[in-house]
Image (spheres, helix red, strand yellow):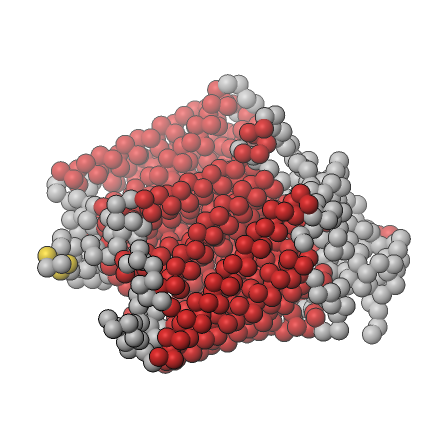
Amino acid sequence: MSIFRTLSTKPWIAERGYVSDSHGFRLPTAKVFLSVFLGVVTALFGLLTAAYFIRMAYADWQALPVPALLWLNTAILILSSVTLQWARVAASREQADGVRRGLLAGGALAFAFLVGQLLVWRQLGSLGYFVDSNPSNSFFYLITGLHGLHLLGGLVAWFRASVRLWRGAEVAKIRMSVELCAVYWHFLLLVWLVMFGLLLVT
Amino acid sequence: MALTDVTHDAQDFVPAVEVEEVELYHPKTWLGKYVFSQDAKIIALQYSITAMAVGLLALVLSLLMRIQLAWPGALSFITPDAYIQFVTMHGMIMVIYLLTALFLGGFGNYLIPLMLGARDMVFPYVNMISYWVYLFAVLLLLASFFTPGGPTGSGWTLYPPQAILPGTPGSGWGITLMVISLVFFVIGFTMGGLNYVVTVLQARTRGMTLMRMPLTIWAIFTATVLALLAFPALLVSCIMMSLDNLLGTSYFMPAIVSLGQQLDYSGGSPVLFQHLFWFFGHPEVYIVALPAFGIVSDLLSVHARKNIFGYRLMVWAIVVIGGLSFVVWAHHMYVSGMNPYFGFFFATTTLIIAVPTAIKVYNWVLTLWRGNIRLTVPMLYAIGFVFTFINGGLTGIFLGNVIVDVPLSDTYFVVAHFHMVMAVSPILAVFGAVYHWYPKITGRMLNEGLGRFHFWVTFVGLYCLYYPMHYLGILGVPRRYFSNVGPNGLPDFIPDSAQFVNIWITIAAICVASSQLVFLYNLFASATRGKPAGGNPWGATTLEWQTTNTPPTHGNFGKELPSVYRWAYDYSVPGAEEDFIPQNVPAGKNTGQAS
């Protein structure tokens, strides 16, 4: 493991007076940024999951019915992730049309997902499952809300990349943005699948 | 001692890889340069000044509490409600808005790019936003002083259910603003923190390998990682608490009768909050302690003119302490009625932390051993830190054991312990760091005489203040009590001698607090009237002392970024002309090493 090799170097002997070419990772900075950020988001949703399980064990917990719309939303989010992946592949092949189509479809589907989630909230509300009715409801609203906010943040990055593309930026210039968007989308899809699974199982 | 052979063949020298030059944003207006600045050094100053200003407020609050304890009723505006509000605000401000912001936002911003040979943070714009979000959080916190009911009085731990129930001071606006302020703090910090971590990973200059980084950077880096992973717990608990408070959910709120009324809450778990809070709260201790460790390591090495003893072990200890800090949180909750096996597990992990910290302490002492010690003001503070940290650490071993903690819980022993280990020690490191780096920041030295005065009053005063507090704790004097005096004006449930100790502590506290005015005066006066410092007054090896301009200008270094040829601790190298070799000096001329 290179990290252990790094940590066991003896900077005071072997390398004294010697320039090595090591200065940062080989990865692009934006990618490193995204991975660290994904670590933070993982901690956030991980803690929420832990809190979910702890709270679930108490007597007043009543499972929330799963609205059918959530299945549709999940499918939409999967599609959104797939289309962004498509854009990413197109970007790596420098196919501007493919990137455009993929980005547009991916963003639109993500919007559709968010609207769908709001509809789920309304459905649940009209059935009397409010945020304060039961802890399971509270967690559902909290988790979907936070997940939605993260997706919204992703849409800001998506919007900036799209604007640059439509203003005529070369594909090579926005390739990294598209790639990062796609990775972020996959990550949020994974988070959603875990959270949805949590809801289904309990 | 045998000298290590450091000769190299020509093929040892890997040709330097080009580091991409960063495009710096060059502001044109005064506002862009000094207010909405994207320069990490300005942001560092903004963070530091804001943190110190709000910290000063917290210091005054602590004095008010001490006056109330020594001479109950002396100040009529200190009601029981006000007292507990002062306790809460003092703790919250000192831990989060002062120490965290100062170490990471202040020193992190200033030192990371300079010590690593970078032009700036990797995302300067995000860095700027980070400060303004922090400032907004501070303003929200301060605003809570002016709301009906005043700031929250729930203790800095904000335990529900009492934090949001009527009857606790500030249960309406106070707690709402507090929680929102914390949410903003976490958001702002995350922006800054991502920057610090990615800068350390990506923006190091040529030759600055991870194991050549100064320990200050290792410590700030690790502390930032801890903060990035721990603050989400605070965020989640704050959001859940405000939902309980504002929307009537029952995450944490149990079925409860308050002031004779059955509330709408049911079934929530206050202990769940405690778990979440301390999952953040314990790493938080190391978020403020680790940067102090790193800074002190560097100060000791520079001012003892000797390489740090056991550099690798120091790095490993930092990383191990960081890792362990995530598995000890429940030692704050021994009295919450946990399963004994659970408590046993957490007592064990807690005591294991003594191993890496003891390694650090031994290495500090061994760094001093036979060093060419210069008792400069920064050195005095660094040594003061080691003393105080040992003291606080030892009482930590008491409290880490369930069976000792239970009777001592909620007494002044706990107050004395955590002040020694995570309040006073880091603050001593902060002072040392300020005296050490002030010449780089302003180009002028702080006044030495005033500095020595400030150190001795602070150091001796702190011991007069906190040693007796341990004694009060063992006597069983409870913390957070408004008064220990009965209606007849005499000590009620504590011996007279204990009340005398209380008076003594208050006098010591007033002395320590007043001596900070000397420090402030020194900071302001020396900025214009101090002795010009030159580029490298301490003869230090790290890159921030090798800049072309002092104070460093926008972009930190001259036309070319420095290349790093050695670790940060080449002091008193045998055969070298001077007793230090800067990191950017290649082997050869004047270093006593073959080129």
Q: Say left or right for B362 vs B559.
A: left
Q: Quadrant of residue B505?
A: bottom left
Above or below B421: residue B9: above
Q: Position of residue B81 (x, y in %)?
A: 27, 57
Q: Say whether residue B348 is visible.
A: no
In-front residue for pair B53/B165 = B53
Q: In the rendered picture of this protein, how many numbered marks are placed on residues?
A: 0
Q: Quadrant of the N terminus of chain A?
A: bottom right
Between B472 and B238, the one lying in front of the other is B472
Q: Toward the viewer: A16 or B369?
A: B369
When the figure is inspected, residue B490 is found, relative to residue B46, above or below; the finding is: below
Residue shown at 48% from the left, 74% from the top: B467
Residue at image point 47% right, 63% down = B510
Q: Residue furthest top?
A: A167
Relative image position of residue B325 (x, y in whole percent)? 47, 64
Dividing the picture into quarters, in which one does residue B71 lie? bottom left
Decide if residue B33 is on the left or right side of residue B230.
right
- Vertical placement of B248 versus A8: above or below? above
Q: Position of residue B281 (x, y in %)?
A: 41, 60
- Identify the residue at horizontal 10%, vertical 57% (top origin): B261
Quadrant containing the C terminus of chain A in the rendered view:
bottom left
> Who's the residue at 84% across and 73% down the image?
B2
**In the depicted view, which residue is nearer to us: B537 or B14?**
B537
Image location of residue B114, percent across then percent down: 66, 46
In the rendered image, is residue A165 in sight? yes
